[in-house]
Image (cartoon, grey):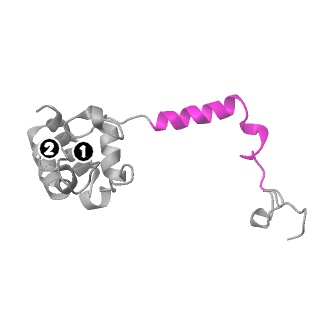
Amino acid sequence: MRSGFFLSPRNSPAVAGPRLAGPSLAGPSLAGPRLAGLVLALLCSLQAHANPVPADDESVARGAQLFQQFCTECHGRDGRAQVDVISDATDLTDPEAYYSGSSEQEIFNSIANGAGVAMPAWRTQLGSDESIWDVVNFIRSLQDN
């Protein structure tokens, strides 16, 4: 590369080629109200979704089975995380101690996608969103005890 030569997005070889007609994401067309509208739309899409699985006895029982199968190694059989495997696992009986939020959607996200460094994602192992919601319902039942 020659000294003093700068590749900007406009003259970069990676984007060289015919220019397409229409608004550019890098141009001023997104300034002001249009940008605000895009940000608002993004924020609205991130709103919490309601738990679609009723927290009835059947769901809590299914969640308890899954919890015993996948979660007790770190959170313990009672959800209090008083096991020696992970020193900073969350006590699931105390929502104020949750690291990644205690709403149903935040619990769902933590289970599905992992949370922090120590909590892996469990979406694949649990197999379906319904199963994850069953575990969320079981965890909520622990808070009532």
Between 82 and 58, the residue placed more toward the observer is 82
Specify whether 27 is left or right of 145: right
Q: Secondary structure at mark 2?
A: helix
Is mark 1 in CB contact (under 8 Å) with mark 2? yes
Q: Residue 72 in magenta?
A: no
Q: Please name the residue shown 77% across and 43% down the image.
A: 27
Q: Which residues are magenta?
A: 20-46
Distance, label 1 to label 2, CA atoms, is 8 Å
Q: Is residue 26 visible?
A: yes
Q: Earlier in the sequence, mark 1 or mark 2?
A: 2
Q: How many marks?
A: 2
- Give residue 18's mark: none
Q: Is residue 55 visible?
A: no
Specify whether 1 is left or right of 70: right
What amino acid type is highlighted by mark number 1? Trp
Q: Which residue is mark 2?
A: 59
Q: Residue 45 in magenta?
A: yes
What amino acid type is highlighted by mark number 2? Ser
Specify whether 20 is left or right of 53: right
At which x and y percent is residue 16? 80, 64
At which x and y percent is residue 104? 29, 37
75 versus 94 height, above or below:
below
Q: Secondary structure at mark 1?
A: helix
Q: Please name the residue shown 56% across and 31% down the image.
A: 40
The residue carrying pointer 1 sits among few (fewer than 14), some (14 to 19) or many (20 or more) residues within 10 Å by Cα, namely many
Q: Which residue is mark 1?
A: 133
